[in-house]
Image: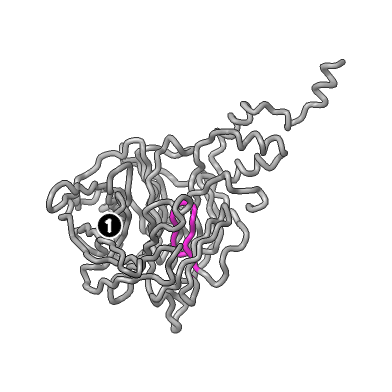
Amino acid sequence: MKNKEARRSSSWADLPPELLGLVLLRLLSLLDRVQLRAVCRAWRSNARLQALPSPLPWLALLDGTFLSIPDGKIIRMPALPGDAFCCGSTDSWLFFVRRDGGCSMVNPFSKATLDLPKLSIKWFDAASPGFGSKFRKLVVPSPLESSPGSLVVAVSLDNYGTSIGMCRPSIATDFSVRKLVRANNLLSDIAFFNGKLYGIGADDPLSELSTFEINYGFDNKPKISVVKRITESPRLRLSLPHDIMSKSNVTGYVVKEYLVECSGRLLKVNRKVESHDDNDAEGIRTWAFEVFEADLSTKPGQWRCVSDLGDQALFVGKHCSKSVPAGEYTGIQEDCIYFMCDYRYLAVDPLHDSGVYNMRTGVITPLLSETAAVPQHRGGQGRPTWIFPADYAIQSTQLSC
């Protein structure tokens, strides 16, 4: 009789913490983790005691929603800054620019906000709904959570060259902008490595790597004092596989480049995309990747071909690229490159050309475990971007599907 009463009085709240931990370990989706914690107070308390791997990153979409990986759920969070476009990200932070040039960093998970000075760069053209400049990327040398006064560097392109804006949020009243006006100074990507800023050329067959020396004047503003070219070209493999060339409308391929720090190495990731002779944008597909490491021990430096990433995985995109140790994340495959469709003319659907490229096998598998209906949104020249959530900061009331 007593045993029957004990069984009747037990509830899900009495689930042993060790069993709850096993359930949490099997949840790849951050949304699922948050919803599990919301079941009852006991689960919420016990879940906080569990040492869990970091959740998979999300994709921040153009309409202000988020795409959960790998389940493909569309997630809506409380309103983000109005009259602003999301132009990039770093870790858990999104970079917003308003039409008047006002800028801010927002962490949609913790709700922290970091105001930045206005950018003097012309972001909008009154004659068109798009940007006046093409925003490339925002980077920081150290995480904003631990270093809110860290240097912030933003890069944009226009018809006249590259603009590099820099500031330190804690003391800055404006961005210090360096304009690179020569054609060979157009930048495809930038990254911090060992505390220094590096960039690779846009539409540059030599893929030259440059370093930007940053100094601080009497006004304590960061300024680029010297630009140095430090590498020669890598040797690219220019042949297309027979099965791709056999397609009647494939004439070759274009290379999209990403620069990313990975486990103490500075890597350049070449993404090879089919080129069509009939402007068939819908048929564009990525078919391979090549990875090179910058060898800075020689003069000039050299690009060395990399055959594997070890226990690391790469997430690449025009607005954000990041390497992560696969073992510290739930469901991430090591020695793989995660990519999405970040072409400006197809950016409304980040899944159009997306996947996971295995460096060992050369095989591309789907990014999502099932299909997803991505909201169609056109506006500006922004592109989807990776964002890496910290689940401890999220409450279930912040999320909706």
Residue at 35% in and 70% down:
219
Residue at 66% in and 36% down:
45
Give the overall secondary structure of the magenta segment.
strand
Give the x, y percent position of residue 8.
82, 25
Q: Is residue 11 above or below residue 160?
A: above
Q: Is 117 displayed left or right of 66 in the figure? A: left
Disc 1 crowd, CA 10 A, few/some/many (<14, 14-19, 20+): many
Residue 53: in sight, yes or no?
yes
Q: Is residue 16 above or below residue 73?
A: above
| Amino acid type, label 1 | Tyr
Q: What element carries label 1?
A: strand
Q: How many labels does the image show?
A: 1
Q: Is 32 displayed left or right of 196 in the figure? A: right
Residue 63 location, quadrant: bottom right
Front position in the image: 289 or 80: 80
Q: Give the range drawn in magenta.
A: 85-97
Residue 168 location, quadrant: bottom left
Give the x, y percent position of residue 305.
21, 44
Residue at 55% in and 72% down:
83
Q: Is residue 233 magenta?
A: no
Give the x, y percent position of residue 334.
38, 37
Residue at the right extreme?
1
Give the x, y percent position of residue 359.
31, 40
Q: Is residue 90 magenta?
A: yes
Q: Is residue 67 above or below residue 330?
A: below
Q: Mark 1 points at which residue?
A: 198
Front position in the image: 183 or 224: 224
Q: Is residue 176 above or below residue 113?
A: below
